[in-house]
């Protein structure tokens, strides 16, 4: 059986371009992107992937026009209210990583409720990064480790990251042709296989998911050693 990634990280890029090509407002691209994400959650759960970590909103995304930021927050609000029951029914455990302090207070409450509702689920772990930045995550972990007085070991530092307790991603997928990490999960991606596709995120479907898994299965992972 080909190797299956246990943990997949995802940068859902290209929503804006998808909308622009159709003469639609950018938020329409995000709306379609959110739909594509729900589709991927189903595929990943069905195929036995254990964890899916997606970049929903970066610390840099605040620099977008207020209208787009507000649109993304409204979308998030909608999904946290309307779609969480569906995720819960499908046994998905939701976990949000990133700095919640800057998020609208009602969204913080919705996140807490959704995490509490799904905390006991044993299916796919869906990790949504919101107001997340990889460098900020590492800096925060260092501060917390210093406050704890060490020990100054890699595993101890990892235990203070937002992603504490999660295995590192085996595969990162980024859509829409960009080939960069954009400050996502910098510590965790050290040995992750990278898969890039030109497909714009709202168009990413089952065939693209299969192609990413097939690409992963062809990789030889040596983790700095010589392999077998
Ligand atoms: C990148 O496309 C996408 C985002 C910045 C947001 C991703 C959000 C979703 C898929 C919707 C789900 C919502 C949340 C908040 C979980 P882009 O706007 O950078 O596209 P472009 O590069 O073509 O402009």
Image (tube, helix red, strand yellow):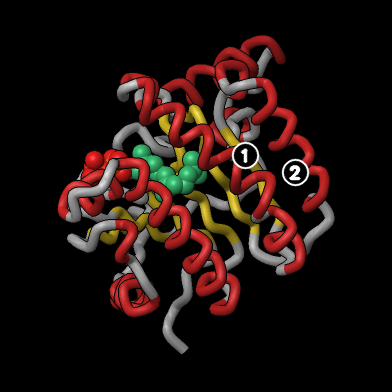
Residue 101 horizontal/vertical position (percent): 61, 17
Is residue 70 shown left or right of residue 201? right
Classify the position of ligand 1 by quadrant: top left, top right, bottom left or bottom right.
top left
Residue occupying the far bottom of the picture: 1
Which of the 4 image quadrants contains residue 190?
Answer: top left
> Which residue is labeled 2 in the image?
115
Which of the 4 image quadrants contains residue 147?
Answer: top right
Taking depth in this image into account, of 226 and 123 the one nearest to the observer is: 123
Question: Are the residues tagged 2 and 1 within 8 Å (C-beta)?
Answer: yes
Label 2 CB, ligand 1: below 8 Å?
A: no
Q: Which residue is pictured at 50% across the width and 26% down the height?
A: 137
> Which residue is labeled 1 in the image?
96
Q: Is residue 40 above or below residue 3?
A: above
Res 159 seen here: yes
Residue 53 horizontal/vertical position (percent): 51, 50
Q: Which residue is pictured at 18% across the width and 60% down the height?
A: 198
Taking depth in this image into account, of 25 and 101 the one nearest to the observer is: 25
**Quadrant in the picture for the C terminus:** bottom left
Is tag 2's residue or tag 1's residue first in the polypeptide sequence?
1
Q: Quick one: SS at disc 1?
A: strand
Q: Is residue 176 above or below residue 43?
A: above
Residue 108 horizontal/vertical position (percent): 68, 28
Label 1 CB, ligand 1: below 8 Å?
A: no
């Amino acid at each position: 059986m080909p190797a299956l990634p246990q943990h997949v990280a995802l940068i859902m890029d290209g929503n804006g371009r998808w909308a622009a090509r159709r003469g639609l407002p950018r938020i329409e691209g995000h709306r379609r992107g959110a739909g594509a994400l729900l589709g991927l959650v189903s595929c990943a759960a069905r195929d036995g992937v254990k964890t899916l970590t997606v970049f929903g909103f970066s610390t840099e995304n605040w620099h977008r026009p207020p209208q787009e930021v507000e649109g993304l927050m409204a979308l998030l609000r909608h999904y946290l209210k309307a779609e969480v029951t569906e995720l819960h029914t499908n046994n998905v455990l939701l976990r949000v990583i990133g700095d919640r302090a800057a998020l609208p207070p009602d969204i913080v409450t919705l996140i807490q409720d959704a995490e509490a509702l799904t905390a006991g689920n044993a299916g796919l772990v869906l990790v949504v990064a919101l107001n997340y930045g990889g460098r900020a995550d590492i800096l925060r972990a260092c501060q917390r480790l210093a406050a704890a007085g060490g020990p100054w070991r890699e595993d101890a530092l990892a235990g203070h990251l937002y992603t504490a307790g999660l295995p590192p991603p085996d595969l990162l997928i980024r859509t829409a042709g960009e080939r960069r990490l954009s400050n996502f999960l910098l510590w965790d991606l050290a040995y992750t296989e990278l898969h890039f596709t030109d497909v714009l995120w709202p168009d990413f479907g089952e065939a693209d998911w299969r192609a990413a898994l097939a690409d992963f299965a062809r990789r030889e992972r040596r983790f700095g050693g010589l392999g077998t």
